[in-house]
Image (cartoon, rainbow, N blue to C red):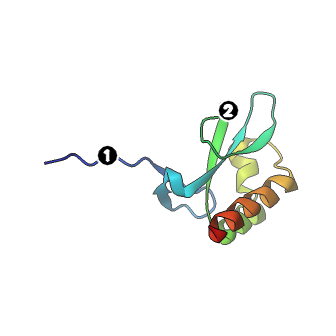
Amino acid sequence: MALQKKIPLRKCVATGEMHPKKEMIRVVRSKEGEVSVDLTGKKSGRGAYVSKSEAAVAAAKKKKVLDNQLEVKVPEEIYEELLRVILREQLK
């Protein structure tokens, strides 16, 4: 009997739902306080995961969940980049 590889789950900060890590987008804050979208999931710093849905990004923005999670003001460009990433994936 083959063992199934454990799929790492992450919780979406906007919706509170658990999803496989690959289905999430990581937003990370570096030690310098810079916020960026981490598509590799490997950047160092404090990370927060958002579901790959426009609704989740909108909710995160509205409730300022990422600001709270990352303890820093998240710039507007980050939300725009998240939406771009989601739209790009939907087109594939």
Q: Amino acid at mark 1?
A: Lys
Direction from residue 81 to residue 14 in the image, left or right: left
Name the element at disc 2: loop
| Residue on which disc 2 sits | 45
Determine which quarter of the picture holds residue 43. Answer: top right
> Percent from the top left, x then y, of residue 88?
70, 64
* Residue 25 screen position, x and y as percent: 63, 53
Left/right placement of residue 29 relative to residue 26 reads: right
Mark 2 packing: few (<14 Cα in 10 Å), some, or many (20+)?
some
Q: Quadrant of residue 76?
A: bottom right
Judged from the image, the secondary structure of the residue bearing numbered disc 1 is: loop
Q: Residue at x 74, y 63 (%)?
A: 83
Residue at the (60%, 35%) spot, across then down: 42
Which residue is at the far right? 76
Task: Report which residue position mark 1 lands on.
Answer: 5
Question: Which numbered disc flags the more N-terminal residue, 1 or 2?
Answer: 1
Query: Horizontal placement of 20 versus 91: left or right?
Result: left
Q: Say the numbered circle drawn on residue 27.
A: none
- Tell which residue pokes out farthest to the front in this image: 92
Residue at the spot 80% in from the left edge and 53% down from the top edge: 78
Residue 47 screen position, x and y as percent:
64, 41
